[in-house]
Image (cartoon, helix red, strand yellow):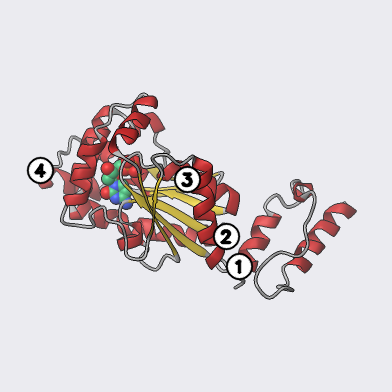
Amino acid sequence: MKTIGMAMSFGILGSYDLLGDGRPWIAIQDPACTSKTFPKFFQALEALRTKFVAVAVDGGAASGKSSTAKVVAHELGLLHVDTGAHYRAVTRALLDAGARAEDIASVLPALAHLRLGSEISGISSVVTLDGHRPVDASLRSEDVNAAVSKFAALPAVRNFLLAYQRSQVALGQAAGFAGVIMEGRDIGSVVLPQAEVRVFLQADPVARAQRRAAEGQTDAVAQRDLLDSTRATAPLVCPEGATRIDNTHLPLVAVVAQVKALVQSVARPA
Ligand code: DC
């Protein structure tokens, strides 16, 4: 009990910006000692110590967004939000309701009945549909892969998701995360244009198709990219001021290190 109190007290003392540049000057050797009394103590402290940071990760299909965003979220205590999963969940629900992207009259009533929510699972915010978490395989099925870009091109669908996606920032703040890392196609350009860090991931199309095949998925990534980047509303673009990272030949750790350095350069004391 005494050790826990000491670790927490020194943690609070260490929050003082002694060096004047945000760098830590006290290291707690075993931060996990607070895991029973206050499991997220150091995460909560970090959120108070630094300003809440928003990180936008955009890029085409299979460009490494999820793998990168999840590791960065885990290592920096950020809330991970996968907006592709939002479009997939809405597509699943619309397909199940018999709607077709080509027939807006079939989409609007189905959309009006949809109730989206969020559950925090570890470091990620997970979308719920009418209070239920959709099974991941049902969001990555062949029919969803084939239809998602068509539904995502509809302004009605994008408007339906925009406020929900923006609300994830407040969710991360309320839950004590140090920031939010949101991945998608229009995050730095439309959803969070104020994001302090913007990253655009890319990789050559052959490498990306191989990644999906290795996951056992049937997914025409180049075709989805074409639809996503040529639609009129919020197309896939490299946002202004974004750092482009081509990861065709870069290991995940190297990409993560680059993104972490960008985040740490803006995450100065509040
Ligand atoms: O990231 P993903 O491959 O799971 O995304 C699935 C589709 O969702 C993608 O092809 C286009 C759409 N999408 C979008 O239009 N805007 C986003 N911010 C995220 C995804």
Q: Are marks 2 and 1 in contact (CB under 8 Å)?
A: yes
**Upstream in sequence: badge 2 or badge 1:** 1
Amino acid, disc 3: Thr
Q: Mark 3 vs mark 4: give the one in front.
A: 3
Q: Secondary structure at mark 2?
A: loop
Q: Nearer the viewer, residue 82 or 195?
A: 195
Residue placed under numbered mark 1 in the picture:
50
> Residue at image x 53%, y 43%?
253
Please state the horizontal and vertical placement of residue 67, each as a whole percent of the image: 46, 41
> Is the residue marked by circle 1 packed among few (<14), some (14-19), or many (20+) residues within 10 Å?
some
- Label whose residue precedes the other's in the sequence (2 or 4): 4
Separation (CA) of disc 3 from disc 4:
36 Å
Determine whether the beta carbon of the residue marked 1 sits less than 8 angstroms from the nearest atom of ligand 1: no
State the SS at label 1. loop
Ligand 1 is found in the corner quadrant, namely top left
Does the CB distance between marks 1 and 4 fall below 8 Å? Answer: no
Q: Percent x, y for residue 235? A: 23, 54
Query: Does label 3 or label 4 sit earlier along the sequence?
Result: 3
Q: Which residue is labeled 4 in the image? A: 103
